[in-house]
Structure formats: structure tokens, C-alpha cells
């Protein structure tokens, strides 16, 4: 009877959290690899000096996935060694001495039938930064590199474990979308677009014309030509170039990049709208503006009862995955500290956007049973929110999770 009551109450809580998530889930999120949540990006700060003087700190580029497209300079001419995220704030899983294996995976099986790869056809790409005050920052990046994988390779971990993109079969080069050009206005494309050039390096002040570029797009004439070797490889691992932000970026804003594949493109001359391409898009959050903004990937509950007591008290917790499918293996870790100071841990890959557990039923990795009143810390590789319900057969009360984690 008690188990049914616990599940019934938690089901109500889950339904509430599921509704809250679904009304905000508007965009298709690009695929991701395990343990690669969102990190913070340093923003310019005003330094106040003597006699009222002020100065603005430099803003530098950052790269979500690093330079993953070459293991030999002869292939691309780019410098080796930066095969992980860089330019982010220390901590928040982005420590300098612990580079992370971040990847953007585009599943073309999510696209319309017209997006299927057919040998002999061409495919282009467009990437647009959707966040105010954030711009492309690598003037030397004149193409977008990518690798391709089958569903089996994604499922068995081959894709997420690979560090460097492979060269295409029968060639000595990594696949790429040919020449890309940068534009300042994402609403204008083709001949009416406003061209620009990314600016590199660290400097103070805002990014102005012609360097305030937010969109890049491949050139039709040099789009990638699909080959017979690409058959069944419906997952694309795409490199995202370096970006930068300036003082117009808003503290706490999510830094999002929209990635669009372009199919069936035709050169229609003066009538650029006569034959628009077939498109398929996904969005990836690559950061949060400013270092001092909480990432919300950790929360805690200051009082829980781990097991049934003489009064039949129990605790249920609900965890909501706010990152959605942008984290392909959302892993939640629960750490319980009991009244004797003993620590118990439990880890699980969430199978639902909103998931509930009864604390007394968790199979702790250390075995045994915690003693007395406890507190519970919940963290993971994704943005989260949560809810707790404590009850017995006669009484129940709930509360939201607390932050920041101790």
C-alpha cells in the first residue's frame, strides 16, 4: 500500500514538471556525447580604479569543441593540440587541465525524406549564432569540417570516444563543406546578405562592422559532394568554429548556435528566392554568458528520510532534465550523507525528461542502509531542476530543490 501511495504522489509531481518542460521545448536540439554539459564563458568586466577611473577587461575567443579536424598539419594547415574545449571559465567541468570531449552530432534521420544522402548530390551548411553580443571569431576558418558515422557506431560508443575526425575513405582529407563565407545579418542571405569577417585575438570594447558576423554559410559551387562511401552514415559530427562575445552580451543568456543543412540548392541567378533549398536544422547550446552565472547542474535537499521509520515516513525526489536531448546520456548522481556522516552514492542515466525515485528504494553503491535523518545532493551533466516530497500514510509535504550546492 505504501509503495502505491508513494508512486501515486510522485506521478502527480512528474506530470507537473513534464508540462513545464514541454511548453518550453520549441527547437530540435542537436545530439551530444555523454558528460558534456554547458559551460560558462568569461564576459568583459568594468574595473574601477582610483579617482573614478574605469577600464574594461579584454574579451577573448572560446571554442566549444576545439580543433578536432586534423592530426597532421599537412591536411589543413591548422595548428594541432587544441582537441578540446578552450576559452571557458575555470570550473563548471571546463577546467584547463581536463579538456572535455564535446561534440555536435546531427542525426539526418530526423530530417525529411528529401534529406537522405544520395550519391552524386551536394549538401551545404549554415550556422547562425542566436544570442545577442556573440560573434564568430576565427578569420582563418574558411570551411566547416565534419565526420560521418552509422547508427551502430553511435550506439556502441565509437563516435563519442573518437578524438580526431577521420579522413574520408579514398582521400587524404577530412570531409568539409567547401568554402564558407560570413555574414552580419542572419535574416538576409544570398546576394542581399551583408558580408563580414570574423576578428581574432583578445581586446576590450564591442565588436563592430564588418566584424560583427553571426552567420556563416557554405558556397553552393563548393558544397560537399555525397559519395557512395557515405551510405548508411546518417550521423554527422560537425565542428563549430571559435566564437567571441562583447559587452552587449547579456549576463546569464544561453549561447545557442543553429545548425542548418542545405539540400537541393540551385543557382537561380538574380532570382535567389525562386528555388529555395530544402533545409533541416537543430540547435546546440554551447555556453552561458559570464562566469558568475549558476549552471544549475547541481541541487540539494537538506532533509530526507532514507528508509521507513517507526512512523512510516518516506521521501521521494523528482529530477527534471532541462537540457533535453542536447545531452545524449543525461547522468544523474545522488550523494546522501546520513546522521553518522557516512556517504552513500547512486548513479543512473535518466531514461525520461522528468524522472522520480523513492529514496528508500535506491540501491546505494556502498550497500547498507543510511542511519537517521540525512541530506541529499543531486548533480549531473545537464541543466536540472527538482522537487522533493516527504510523507507518511497521514501527512505529506513537498518542497523545491535548493541551490547552490555546498
Image (tube, rainbow, N blue to C red):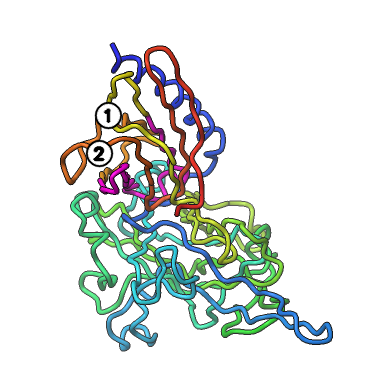
In the image, residue 65 sits, relative to residue 75, either above or below, namely: above
Query: In this view of the protein, which residue sits in the foreground, 68 or 86?
Result: 86
Whether the residues at callouts 2 and 1 have beta carbons within 8 Å, the answer is yes
Query: Going from the N terminus, do you reach mark 2 or mark 1 first?
Result: 1
Residue beneath the point at 35% across and 72% down: 99
Horizontal side, residue 134 vs residue 264: left or right: right
Q: Quadrant of the C terminus?
A: bottom left
Horizontal side, residue 191 vs residue 241: left or right: right
Residue beneath the point at 54% across and 77% down: 61
Q: Is residue 340 magenta?
A: yes
Distance between the Cα atoms at labels 2 and 1?
A: 8 Å
Residue beneath the point at 50% across and 73% down: 62
**Badge number at residue 370:** 2
**Magenta segment range?**
316-344
Query: In this view of the protein, which residue sits in the foreground, 236 or 202?
Result: 202
Query: In this view of the protein, which residue sits in the foreground, 8 or 16?
Result: 8
Q: Residues within 10 Å of mark 2 (few under 14, many from 20)?
A: many
* Residue 325 percent across, percent down from the top left: 40, 45
Quarter of the view holding residue 354: top left
| Residue 3 in sight in this render | yes
* Residue 288 percent across, percent down from the top left: 55, 60
* Residue 240 percent across, percent down from the top left: 45, 67
Q: Residues within 10 Å of mark 1 (few under 14, many from 20)?
A: some
Element type where label 1 sits in the image: loop
**Badge number at residue 319:** none
Horizontal side, residue 86 vs residue 255: left or right: left
Residue behind mark 1: 307
* Residue 305 percent across, percent down from the top left: 34, 32
In the image, residue 183 sits, relative to residue 330, either above or below, namely: below
Query: In this view of the protein, which residue sits in the foreground, 237 or 377?
Result: 377
Amino acid at each position: 500500500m505504501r509503495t502505491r501511495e508513494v508512486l501515486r504522489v510522485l506521478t502527480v509531481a512528474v506530470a507537473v514538471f513534464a508540462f513545464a518542460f514541454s511548453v518550453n521545448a520549441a527547437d530540435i536540439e542537436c545530439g551530444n556525447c555523454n558528460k558534456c554539459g554547458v559551460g560558462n564563458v568569461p564576459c568583459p568586466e568594468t574595473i574601477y580604479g582610483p579617482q573614478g577611473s574605469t577600464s574594461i577587461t579584454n574579451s577573448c575567443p572560446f571554442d566549444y569543441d576545439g580543433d578536432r579536424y586534423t592530426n597532421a598539419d599537412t591536411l589543413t594547415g591548422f595548428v594541432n593540440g587544441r582537441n578540446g574545449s578552450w576559452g571557458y571559465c575555470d570550473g563548471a567541468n571546463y577546467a584547463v587541465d581536463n579538456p572535455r570531449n564535446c561534440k555536435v552530432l546531427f542525426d539526418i534521420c530526423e530530417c525529411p525524406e528529401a534529406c537522405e544522402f544520395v550519391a552524386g548530390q551536394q549538401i551545404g551548411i549554415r550556422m547562425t549564432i542566436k544570442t545577442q553580443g556573440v560573434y564568430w571569431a576565427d578569420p582563418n576558418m574558411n570551411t566547416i569540417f565534419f565526420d560521418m558515422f552509422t547508427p551502430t557506431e553511435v550506439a556502441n560508443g565509437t563516435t563519442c570516444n573518437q578524438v580526431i575526425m577521420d579522413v574520408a575513405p579514398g582521400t587524404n582529407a577530412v570531409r568539409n563543406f567547401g568554402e564558407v563565407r560570413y555574414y552580419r545579418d542572419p535574416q538576409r542571405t544570398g546576394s542581399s546578405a551583408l558580408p563580414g569577417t570574423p576578428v581574432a585575438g583578445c581586446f576590450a570594447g564591442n565588436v563592430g562592422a564588418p566584424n560583427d558576423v553571426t552567420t556563416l554559410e557554405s558556397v553552393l559551387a563548393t558544397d560537399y559532394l555525397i559519395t557512395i562511401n557515405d551510405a548508411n552514415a546518417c550521423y554527422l559530427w560537425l565542428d563549430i568554429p571559435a566564437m567571441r562575445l562583447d559587452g552587449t552580451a547579456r549576463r546569464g543568456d544561453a549561447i545557442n548556435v543553429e545548425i542548418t543543412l542545405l539540400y537541393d540548392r540551385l543557382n537561380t541567378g538574380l532570382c535567389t528566392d525562386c528555388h529555395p533549398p530544402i533545409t533541416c536544422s537543430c540547435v546546440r547550446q554551447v555556453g552561458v554568458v559570464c562566469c558568475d552565472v549558476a549552471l544549475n547542474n547541481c541541487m540539494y535537499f537538506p532533509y530526507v528520510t532514507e528508509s521507513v521509520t517507526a512512523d512510516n515516513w518516506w521521501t521521494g525526489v523528482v529530477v527534471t532534465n532541462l537540457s533535453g536531448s542536447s545531452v545524449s546520456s543525461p547522468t544523474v548522481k545522488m550523494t546522501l550523507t546520513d546522521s553518522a556522516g557516512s556517504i552513500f552514492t547512486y548513479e543512473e542515466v535518466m531514461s525520461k525528461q522528468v524522472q522520480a525515485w523513492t529514496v528508500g528504494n535506491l540501491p546505494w553503491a556502498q550497500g547498507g542502509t543510511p542511519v537517521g535523518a540525512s541530506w541529499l545532493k543531486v548533480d549531473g551533466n545537464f541543466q536540472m531542476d527538482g522537487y522533493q516530497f516527504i510523507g507518511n500514510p497521514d501527512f505529506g509535504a513537498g518542497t523545491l530543490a535548493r541551490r547552490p550546492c555546498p
